[in-house]
């Protein structure tokens, strides 16, 4: 999956060279780079920088990529195991 996302980023940067070195694909939080919009495959999040590159990439590729901003509350919480109600 990292390779596929990296291909999307590379194709986007080839089309818009002004965004070179502003987007990165990482596989762990330890690899996240300061000041760069990083898409972390380990938890399907990205670092929100509000940069022109980030906004343009997301507009071009949503809903193809499904990442949530890092540190934001989740939209859908997994349901707790429901106890059977007495009938």
Image (spheres, grey):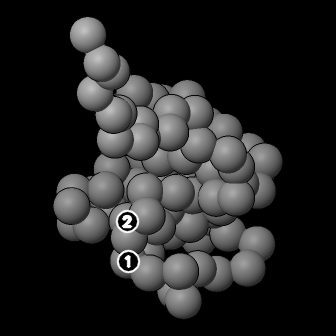
Residue farthest to the top? Answer: 87
Q: Is residue 84 above or below residue 70?
A: above
Q: Which residue is mark 1?
A: 27
The answer to which image quadrant residue 20 occupies is bottom right
Residue 13 horizontal side relative to residue 11, left or right? right
* Secondary structure of residue under mark 1: loop
**Within 10 angstroms of label 1, few (less than 14), some, or many (20 or more) residues?**
some
Q: Secondary structure at mark 2?
A: loop
The residue at the point 41 percent across, 36 percent down is 79
> What quarter of the picture does the N terminus occupy?
bottom left
Who's the residue at 76% across and 72% down the image?
35
Task: Give above or below for 66 relative to 87.
Answer: below
Q: Earlier in the sequence, mark 1 or mark 2?
A: 1
User: Is residue 48 shown above or below 57?
Assistant: below
Q: Residue at x 53, y 80 (%)?
A: 29
- The image shows residue 56, relative to residue 1, as above or below, that is above
Residue under label 2: 41
Tell me the CA gap for discs 1 and 2: 5 Å
Q: List x then y, in percent, for residue 49.
A: 76, 56
Query: Residue extending furthest bottom?
Result: 30
Q: Are marks 1 and 2 in contact (CB under 8 Å)?
A: yes
Q: Give percent across and percent down for residue 39.
A: 49, 62
Q: Is residue 39 visible?
A: yes
**Residue at 38 percent of width and 70 percent of height:** 42
48 sits left or right of 20 in the view? right
Residue 67: x percent and y percent? Answer: 47, 47
Mark 2 Cα-neighbour bin, 10 Å: few <14, some 14–19, many ≥20: some
Q: In this rendered view, identify the residue nearer to me: 31 or 8.
A: 31
Classify residue 7 as left or right of residue 14: left
């Amino acid at each position: 999956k990292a390779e596929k996302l990296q291909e999307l980023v590379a194709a986007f940067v080839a089309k818009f060279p002004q965004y070179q070195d502003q987007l990165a694909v990482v596989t762990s939080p330890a690899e996240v780079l300061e000041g760069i919009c990083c898409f972390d495959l380990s938890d399907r999040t990205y670092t929100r920088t509000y940069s022109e590159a980030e906004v343009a990439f997301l507009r071009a590729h949503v809903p193809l990529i499904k990442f949530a901003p890092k540190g934001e509350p989740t939209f859908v919480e997994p349901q707790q195991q429901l106890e059977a109600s007495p009938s």
